[in-house]
Image: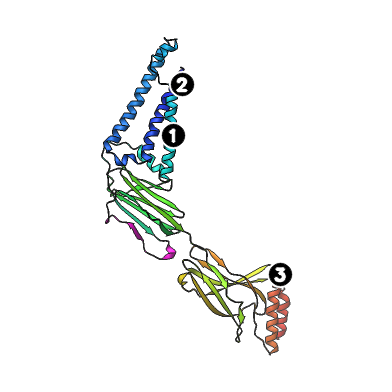
Amino acid sequence: MSKTKTLFRIVQYALVIFGAYVSASLFEVWAYLPYWLKNIALVGCLSAVYWNTRKNLRAYSRLKHYQSPAEVKLLGLQPAWKLHALSFAVLGGLILGVSYTESGIPGRILQAMTFSLKQPPTEILLNLTITPPSYLNQQEVFLLSEKEGPYGRYDGNDIIFLPEGSILTIEIKNTEDFSPFISLGNSLGRSYKTSKGVYLSKHILNEETTLDIRVGPYVSIRQAFEVIPDEAPRVALVAKPTLTKRKSYELKYTLWDDHGVEEVFLELSRRGITGTETEVIFLPVFVVPDGQITLTYHTNLLSHPWAGSTVSAVIKAVDSLGQIGTGEPVILLLPEKSFQNPVAQTLVSIRKALLITPGRKSAQIQRLNILTN
């Protein structure tokens, strides 16, 4: 047996012991056993690695003096197939442990590697608060409170549904100097310790996740969250805008949003020679009960600079996240006032000419001078 192969067996033996120890942590075996037994297991594993290393290295040094297979067998070296079989068994246990855990794997592995002779806490004081997004204008809510605690092992059976952008705040007390491991899904969350010995951690929830808190081998807090995304507003015209007797357009439209809108406006677009021009007319904003409301609004565009022109009109709504809902565009002929006075008719003609060909101002200035003279 070469020296390289001997060292490989020693490393493999150490990995088998470490893998078995991690598997026990993934299956939460330590949570049902006394803590002193975990320390004994750690010391036993280290002693076993040392014993196996010393045995194999001593055997390797004696191989130089023995040549026959029978004499080598007398040294008591373990057959390789037993070690390989044990490796596959431990690997299978790790795979089963990962599938059993589903989330919080990094926190559990790091917790398993934490060695301390001090007895860890069996219960902690915990505050879990949810701060809804600012656009909801709601107060924070306590999911778990230290006043209802302390907590040891908590597994939320029901999934909690939260709006997108909610802030999860975690306060952990009474940890007896055991650093808590906080996982969201399979990502470790950062926490910092305040001057009062309280561990704080904040997270913005934007996707489905599971919170996993572990303090020592006994404390395990788990809660699943489902995030409800904030959808963009939806706008739809109930009927095509119609002109009233007073030459006002009647807009009848349906507005929908899950959390309410910030602003609603009518966007008018007119294609000119140099490009497309856009004008915005803001509409009243109403509370959207039950997510949907039908509104009727009258707008008088007789005094609009584009009066008498054909425009494209579309109603748009914006929510607090800046998401824009757009209705179907319609073509409108803006009404204009009719004048009998020749001077007024000429002024209207000059205004229209400036709208169509704004670059030819000099010709319209001459017309205006003639009119004033």
Is 282 colored magenta in this rendering? no
Q: Earlier in the sequence, mark 2 or mark 3?
A: 2
Q: In the rendering, which numbered label is found on residue 273?
A: 3
> In the rendered structure, which amino acid carries the disc numbered 1?
Leu
Q: Position of residue 88 (x, y in %)?
A: 45, 31
Task: Indicate whether 264 appears above or below 132.
Answer: below
The front one of 97 and 131 is: 97
Residue 101 shows which numbered tag?
none
For residue 143: magenta?
Answer: yes
Residue 32 or residue 105, whichever sits in front:
32
Residue 151 is left or right of residue 278, and the answer is left
- The reply to whether discs 1 and 2 touch (Cβ–Cβ < 8 Å) is no
- First in sequence: mark 3 or mark 1? 1
Q: Please give the name of the residue rendered at 44% of the width and 28% of the height, measured from the top-left corner.
A: 85
**What x and y, as percent, mark residue 26?**
38, 40
Q: CA distance from mark 3 to mark 1?
A: 73 Å
Examine the image and state in which quarter residue 62 appears: top left
Identify residue for label 1: 91
Say what secondary structure mark 2 lies in.
Answer: helix
**Looking at the image, is 254 positioned above or below residue 41?**
below
Q: Which portion, as a residue range, is magenta?
A: 133-148
The amino acid beneath tag 2 is: Lys
Of badges 3 and 1, the one in the foreground is 1
Say which amino acid is labelled 3.
Ile
For marks 1 and 2 on the same chain, the one whose residue lies earlier in the sequence: 2
Q: Position of residue 270 (x, y in %)?
A: 66, 72
Q: Is residue 154 above or below residue 91?
A: below
- Identify the residue under disc 2: 5
Mark 3 touches mark 1? (CB < 8 Å)? no
